[in-house]
Structures are given as C-alpha cells and as structure tokens.
Amino acid sequence: MPDYVVGHKIPDSDSICSAIALSYLQTTLGKETVPARLGELSPETNFILDKFGFEAPMLKTSYAGESLYIVDHSDRVQGPDDIDDATILGIIDHHKLGDITTSTPLECWIRPVGCTNTIIKMMYDFHGVEIPKNIAGAMMCAILSDTVIFKSPTCTTADIKCVEALAEIAGIEDFKAVGMEMFKVKSAVEGTPVRDLVLRDFKDFDMNGNLVGIGQLEVTDLSVFDEMKADLEADIAALKAEGKRHSVILLLTDIMKEGSELLVVSDDDTLIERAYGKTTVEGKVWIDGFLSRKKQVVPPLQQAFV
Amino acid sequence: MPDYVVGHKIPDSDSICSAIALSYLQTTLGKETVPARLGELSPETNFILDKFGFEAPMLKTSYAGESLYIVDHSDRVQGPDDIDDATILGIIDHHKLGDITTSTPLECWIRPVGCTNTIIKMMYDFHGVEIPKNIAGAMMCAILSDTVIFKSPTCTTADIKCVEALAEIAGIEDFKAVGMEMFKVKSAVEGTPVRDLVLRDFKDFDMNGNLVGIGQLEVTDLSVFDEMKADLEADIAALKAEGKRHSVILLLTDIMKEGSELLVVSDDDTLIERAYGKTTVEGKVWIDGFLSRKKQVVPPLQQAFV
C-alpha cells in the first residue's frame, strides 16, 4: 500500500507541486508514495501542470488507517478531516507551527522561507537525488507564485537561489517572464462565479478558539474587480452567515502596486483596527505593502485575538 | 540581547548537550545564542560536562519577551511555563510532534532518530560549520546515552554513523568504553534521596486530557534497586497524591538484560493491561525488551487513553 503526500484544503500551486515533488523524491528513495489533493485545482495550478506535462494528483479526502506526508500546512483545520486516524510520517512546511500533533516520532522540515518547494529542494540536495526537468519547472513556478515573483516580504535569499537553480535544471532562461505569464492566468477572474473566486485561495485559521477565514486573490491590476466588488462583498457576508466563522476577510492583492484591499465581515468591528491600526470604511480598507497573508495578515490578527 | 536554547524540564544529557551544541552553531552563524536549562543536572550530565570541560548552562526558567530555540521536546508541558509569551525561533527534536504552536514561521528540524544531537550534527553539516573537539565529545555522549549505546530500538543508522564521526572529531578511540563508563555513573543510585531518583529523568505527558508522569532509571544491573524498591513504590504513590496526575510510572531499566520493570500507580487499574497486554502484580511488571520510553512506553499508553 503506498503512502500519500497531501497539501491543504483548497490547494494552491505550492500544495500541489510540493506533493508531486516530494512523492517523486520518496518513491526514488524506496518508499512508494502517491501525490494527492484535498480539492479542486486553481487556473494557476492547471497552467503549471499543463506547462510541464503533469496530470492532476488524485482527489482523496479521507486518510483513516493510511500513512501520509503533510505539505504546506501544520494546522488541523487545513488538513484532512480524519487526520487523527492516519499516521503522519512527516510535515514539510513554511508557515507558523500549527496544532497538528502525532503519537509517534516523525520527520519535520519546517523553515521560515517563502515556499514549501524551496524546502523540498533542500531535501533533494540532502539525499543527493537529481530533480527531473519537469518537476524542477513545477517547483520553480510554485516558488514564483508563493513569493509573488520575489516581491513578497516572505521571500528569502534561499527562495531566490532555489528558483535560479531550478530554472537551470528545467532549461528555462527567463523565469520572470514565466512568472508574469502565470500571474496573468491568475488575474483572469471575469466569467468566474463569485463564490469560486472567494474560495479560490481560502484558508481557515483557529484564532484563540475563533474560526477566521481568509481568502486572497492576487492580480496584476486591481481594476479587474471594479465591476464585481459589490458581489464579492455580498458573497463573503453570505459565506459568514452560512458557517460558524467569527470573521471572513478577502484580500484583493495588486502585485504590481504591491498592496492589498481587505474586504471584511466580522463579529467584531474593532478587529481590523486592533490588528493593523487601519480603519475599514464600509467594510473595506487598502493597506499599502500588504502582499503576504502568512507574514503580514495572519500574525497581527492572531495577536488581536489574545 | 542574546537568544536562548533550552531543552525540557528535568533536563537529561541530550537536552543539555544539544543546547550547548546548537548555541555554539547559531553564535558561529552570527546569531548570539546562550545555552540554558530548566532544572538541575543529573550525575550523568555532570560526568559529560566535566569530561569535556564545560560549565553548566545557566539556570533560566522564564522566557517572557525573549526569543529562543527549543531542543529535545515539542510538548508544552515539558517546556518553559511562560512559553506563550516568548518567540520560538526553532525546534530541534526527535520525539512525536507535541502541542507547541507559534504565531510566526520558524525553523523545525525534527527527525525520527535516536537523539537530538544527531540532528544537530546534520545542522552543522548543512551550514558547513566545523564542530569543536569538546562539543563533539559532549554530543557523542548524549547520543550514546539516548540510544543506550545503540541498544535502544530508537537507535538508527544515522545515530551510529554520527557517533563514529563525532568520536573521530573528539579524538576518542573506544567510544563504547566511554559509554559504559557513563552508564556506570548513571547506575550509582545508592545514597541518593528516593525523590531525587524518581525525578531524575521524569517527563509529564498530556494524554487525551490526562496528566501522566513517567520516570526512568537506566542502570547496568537492576539489583542496585533491591533494597530501595519499596521506598520507590511508596514515593511514586506519594508523588501522585501530591499532584493532579492520572498515573505515575517509574521504569527501572536494565541496559544489560535489555528490559524494564514498571512500577505503576494509576487511577485506572486496567491501564497497563490495555496498553501493553501485561498485568501488573502488586503494581509492578517486568517487560522484556522495553528500553525506550519514547518508542515503546509512551505510544501504546497514549493509544490506551483514546
């Protein structure tokens, strides 16, 4: 029976590409391992898989009785629902340490870098395994996506060096051009149902007992949202009303202007003010320089719940 | 202001030696870091520090407002009491993943190997930093201690290779002889107050909401306990009565016969039977092959609480 590698719910390109890259590594090392996913792929991820000739990893949401590696998260709420009944062999991640625990020793490669795939490159180097050309291309795109082509404050020297090395392996000369092509695919939001946009890159966080959902849409020009902003606002309000969330936040991120507009629906009107020192006007506020949910949006918000 | 490296409460040789080894590495890499400890040193650890010319790390139990690396544990109950008010920069550990969480990204090197110092050797290699002779000697002893000179089921090929490499750096020809010398120091229990023995290598675990304390005394011949066993039994009963623990277990481990006698005081008389399929007689049971608290004692016990 093979082991699995799976990223978080509502998978992004890092979750999918790191599952593919890690399962190839483990299989090469003699542990047969299959990449899997917890949800539908985004247009950006489809672009990457098409470009480098990969099928989508299998959709598999239940892991009871199985063994798996977890990539790109360590929070229970983001992982498989029945993770307590599975054996976690390892966690590869670049976020804050979440609340997943295990009953047996495991392997954790967690680093404060911009992307899980940067850490997986370290694992290939540690084990002396050669990265196939197409896997290198997918890993490179995932890092360009997570670091917003090196613009994000989460980007480290290790990420940049890693992209350069992977581009060489993949035989790609102008990796920034590939990154821009990818972000243009990501920016094509017209014609997509509003709920699909809200949930395209959406993560739930447990903040001191409060469930907070934070979505993010990264585009090359915020004006693509001009005609649908009212619909997005209405939909995050609807999403909050449907569930048990204390707050729902949608980040509309302009990767060229390097900032984000936050659309906010919350049980606590002072939350955004307390977290970021900025006041929402009609549930909206632009914050200059905000590109990273992980590094800029989540930590102050979590502090505001203490 | 320097950062700190600290191991678990009631520090063992791995917690102390890995704090010394990691703080030297971080300081060499440009991050001034000081080794610290949460409690008194054991005779075994004093033997190691004396042998290689180290002072005891500073006793420091409060870390509010400071930044630190955690070594040899990832369970809240084993770490500093005010860890929530500190910034955790990283965790280096070889146990199951515990319930420590962070609000910012960090560095975790967690591997299913026999000793934290084996992982710290990997970190030195990763960063290309040379290990000083005396630090190599201390790291080597910690691995020999944790793996019971390679006899423990927790011992991996990585631990053995690491001890060989560290012995060479330290200029030690017969590392097994050093290991036996160290375990003889550890076996000298006569004249020590009973409570000191019970708490010498004692860890608390949160098992599904129940506090379980497990101590371990590793000796080269179990007969050293013949005259004090009744006192040890009375003392773990007293220890349980003093606190909120569901169970207190003391492992009397014979490293030559390769097994342990368990002394047990518990709110649940069926616990040991359910966990290990062995019945205690008057609160005692010998289990052949039991050397490792981490790998053999804790996981089945944790399962028995589900």
Image (cartoon, coloured by chain):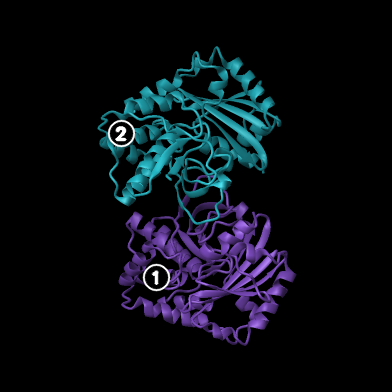
Chain colours: A purple, B cyan
Residue B134 badge: 2
Q: Is residue A182 visible?
A: yes
Residue B44 badge: none
**Are discs 2 and 1 both within one chain?**
no
Label 2: state its secondary structure: helix
Relative to B157, is A270 on the left or the right? right
Q: CA distance from mark 2 to mark 1?
A: 42 Å
Classify mark 1: residues with Cα within 10 Å, few (<14), some (14-19) or many (20+). many
Pick the residue in front: A171 or A201.
A201
- Foreground mark, 2 or 1, reads 2
Residue B95: x and y in percent read: 50, 42
Residue positioned 62% across, 78% down in the render: A196
Mark 2: amino acid: Asn
Q: Output the chain of dot 2.
A: B
Residue positioned 30% across, 33% down in the render: B134
Relative to B35, is A103 on the left or the right? right
Mark 1: amino acid: Met
Residue under numbered circle 1: A140
Residue B224 vertical position relative to residue A119 in the rendered view, above or below? above
Q: Output the chain of dot 1.
A: A
Q: Is residue B157 visible?
A: no
Residue A181: x and y in percent read: 43, 82
Residue B28: x and y in percent read: 32, 46
Pick the residue in front: B155 or A158.
A158
